[in-house]
Amino acid sequence: MGVAVRHFDAVVVGAGGAGMRAALQLSEAGLKTAVLSKVFPTRSHTVAAQGGVSASLGNSEPDNWHWHMYDTVKGSDWLGDQDAIEFMCREAPKVVVELEHFGMPFDRNPDGTIYQRPFGGHMSDFGEGKPVRRACAAADRTGHAMLHALYQRNVRANTHFFVEWMALDLIRDAEGRVQGVVAMEMETSEIVVFQAKATLFATGGAGRIFASSTNAFINTGDGLGMAARAGIPLEDMEFWQFHPTGVAGAGVLITEGVRGEGGILRNSSGERFMERYAPNAKDLASRDVVSRAMVSEINEGRGCGPNKDHVLLDITHLDPEVIMSKLPGIREISIKFAGVDPIKAPIPVVPTCHYQMGGIPTNYHGEVVIDGQPVHGFYAAGEVACASVHGANRLGTNSLLDLLVFGKSSANSIIEFVKQQPEDLPQLAMADVERSVARVARLDNQTNGVQVHDARAEMQRVMQAHCGVFRFKDMLAEGVEKILEVAGMVAKTEIGDKSKVFNTARIEALELENLIEVAKATMVSANARTESRGAHVRDDAPDTPETPNGRDDTNWLKHTLWFREGNRLQYKPVNMKPLTVDTIKLKARSY
Ligand SMILES: Cc1cc2nc3c(=O)[nH]c(=O)nc-3n(C[C@H](O)[C@H](O)[C@H](O)COP(=O)(O)OP(=O)(O)OC[C@H]3O[C@@H](n4cnc5c(N)ncnc54)[C@H](O)[C@@H]3O)c2cc1C
């Protein structure tokens, strides 16, 4: 078969924060590194991150990594692995200062230190004290600043970027060792094999499985789809974060930093309703808690607007100077997408799909693990990976931190691994390459098929209706049936345009084949987990003293693993043992 093969030490799929942090480490260590990205690196979704990156620098008030670790474990509703969480929170000050030295233009305090703002769920004194200023920010464009700083560093380190290349499939040999990826150049539709000693997935999230999402159109879960097709399980896919403040009707994100700067959520009677749901943290409670409170207000008839279908985010009491200097992008988004100037009127907001807590199972070294064993040559970092530091619910600003910490640690693992590998690459496993080529050929040869946008719209509708902020037993069971039907549609998609040059129809069809794997994993895993925990909340999970808020630690303190083959589920224990400190013991979660 006439497929060209290119050889590298390491191939990184994805040029967001995770991929670029990793690539920088690899290139600086002298590894021949290829980075593939569907879009120009600085257009990756990380660019849209607004609020900040967490680190217990304590620049404005006392803080330390022990408090950060406690908050993260509590935020995860105890589903996060405590070894990985300790590692991340301890590394945080180091990787943030490192980023500062890479040239990241953080906002500054008058004394020149990095500016920090409060964010939901980040508290002082092991959750007992008041919200703490832990989010390091560059106005409301933190991800933008981060991505540009990392890109420029990579240019300096001579990282080899393949821009507008889409990875199609993972290549594994008969023993399951990973050899690289099959990829397509979007400009020409040419298929090329990238063979490497080590492969890192940093392909970001898959928020596009839902109809309403803050995610970019390119967030189609390609890494998850590729892993699932290659027999790698997906972990904890039932846990999706709905961000409380998407612009009503548009889905565009309004950062939690707005509430960090003093913004307040109000219902139709102007009441600050979060005081009832989270008396201590109020508007700065964890995201799952705030999202559910908002949906309850709307469901109980206290929503705003003619359809009573949203609530209001009010910052009219803030000094316009603060809004202009600390939240300029938010003001622009409000004017453009909601038609209101937040200096004068509150912003209409609703919970919107934002982040996947689950992903490809890894340890805190960024190695992909199945049954406790690293998969030879395969690594994952960033939103596509599940380390698991976010457990059942992620705290705001912990994702940008995750990118830096695990981008770096996975690269360090790769550097050590590559040293031990023979100079020459092994014989290429052609079976996976042929399967991938056949997948593209199927699409080109399909007749009397289903339109891609019809199948995608149906998937998004089913996910939104059957697997949203609140989940219901019957709806989930029905959701499994429906999503399998949609999978049948996806297997028969047809594209009208079969041309080779920048054929976006082909790309979208291939992306849908990845999205549907994510949707199936989500629905099947959610249907099986009969408790409420973090972002996964079911109507049939009883609130008793043994199962506070429906959380059932006796039966469900475990990670889900979904395998594509036969929609099989398997479970593995949560690692409750940190690296150097005592276990953070189970406790009912309230804010
Ligand atoms: C609007 C918004 C605001 C946010 N704000 C914050 C915040 O303030 N703080 C915080 O901590 N978190 C925030 N988050 C979450 C955080 O930004 C993301 O989780 C994080 O940026 C993901 O980074 P990543 O490197 O994993 O992936 P991404 O930045 O999404 O990058 C993925 C990369 O993979 C590439 N790719 C994907 N598929 C393929 C393929 N098949 N072939 C080749 N390349 C591929 C893409 O081209 C891209 O380069 C926010 C998220 C959103 C959506």
Image (tube, grey):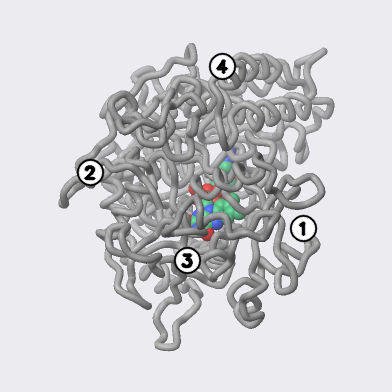
Instruction: Please state which amino acid type lies under the numbered disc 1.
Output: Phe
Residue at 40% across, 88% down = 111
- N-terminal-most mark, 3 or 2: 3
Instruction: Please state which amino acid type lies under the numbered disc 3.
Output: Arg
**Residue 542 occupies which quadrant of the picture?**
top left
Q: Which residue is mark 3?
A: 153
- Pinpoint residue 238: horizontal percent, then vertical percent: 48, 31
What is the distance, in whole Å, between disc 3 and disc 4 at their CAs?
49 Å
What is the distance, in whole Å, between disc 2 and disc 4 at their CAs?
33 Å
What is the distance, in whole Å, between disc 2 and disc 1 at their CAs?
44 Å
- Pinpoint residue 589: horizontal percent, then vertical percent: 36, 45
- N-terminal-most mark, 1 or 3: 3
Q: Which residue is mark 2?
A: 585
Dot 4: what SS? helix
Q: Which residue is mark 4?
A: 477
Front one among 10 and 514: 514
Residue at 40% across, 22% down = 173
- N-terminal-most mark, 4 or 1: 1
Instruction: Please state which amino acid type lies under the numbered disc 4.
Output: Ala
Dot 1: what SS? helix
What is the distance, in whole Å, between disc 3 and disc 2 at their CAs?
41 Å
Residue contact at pointers 3 and 4, CB within 8 angstroms: no
Front one among 330 and 102: 330
Dot 2: what SS? loop
Q: Which residue is mark 1?
A: 337
Looking at the rendered image, the disc whose residue lies closer to the viewer, 1 or 3, is 1
Residue 56 makes an appearance in the image: yes
